[in-house]
Image (cartoon, coloured by chain):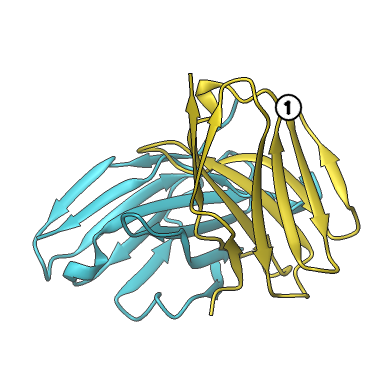
Chain colours: A yellow, B cyan
Amino acid sequence: GESVGLHLPTLSVQEGDNSIINCAYSNSASDYFIWYKQESGKGPQFIIDIRSNMDKRQGQRVTVLLNKTVKHLSLQIAATQPGDSAVYFCAENTGDYKLSFGAGTTVTVRA
Amino acid sequence: EPEVTQTPSHQVTQMGQEVILRCVPISNHLYFYWYRQILGQKVEFLVSFYNNEISEKSEIFDDQFSVERPDGSNFTLKIRSTKLEDSAMYFCASSDPGREGTDTQYFGPGTRLTVL
């Protein structure tokens, strides 16, 4: 089965609202997690990462939360903008330089 | 800002033909990767490459696939005899964990391979 997965395949959010995208993983040996954004016809674009020794990490308008107890990862986007419309993937790494991607959540921002 | 580049952006080939997908990783990165994404599906790992040899490969990466770093800047993926199911987006990525202290992989824009 999948090692990494997302709870919801689609998310519709009003412009200006906050977005929360969730991801569940099953490999307890994973020690590094990344969120990627993929716009139509483009490659995955790095957003933010977090190591397993952290619970939270903040970037510009984005926050990643890691709950190792329940193997859950989330990405929060503050004040969602039209340019945030994309597919968001979580990915995990177990230290062997390959990433395992989740299925992706399509975020649509309503004007 | 440095970025990974890939050529061509779209490759159309006949089943059974050989294709070579090309990538220029970020300069000074030492680890290189190929991933693929079948339309509408998740990104799947194919192979990682370091110090001129394969570090790890997935079960997708069978004998029909090979990778090469022919010079100091290019990294290629060859599919010897393409099948219909090889149709996908192929992404190259690179990273430099030693310098950055992380395993962040930076992806190129992809090559769309269509096998007819």
Query: What's the residue type where badge 1 is placed?
Result: Arg
Total residue callouts: 1
Q: Which residue is mark 1?
A: A61
Which x, y percent locates residue A9? 49, 53
Which x, y percent locates residue A47? 65, 38
Q: Is residue A98 left or right of residue A76?
A: left
Position of B38 relative to A107 (above/below): below
Secondary structure of residue under mark 1:
loop
Which x, y percent locates residue B112? 28, 48
Would residue B103 be visible to someone looking at this image? no
Q: Residue at x 48, y 18 (%)?
A: A111
Q: Is residue A68 left or right of residue B30?
A: right
| Residue situated in front as seen by the camera: B3 or A35 | A35
Q: Residue at x 68, y 51 (%)?
A: A34
Position of B5 relative to B13 (above/below): above
Which x, y percent locates residue A4? 61, 66
| Residue situated in front as seen by the camera: B17 or B52 | B17
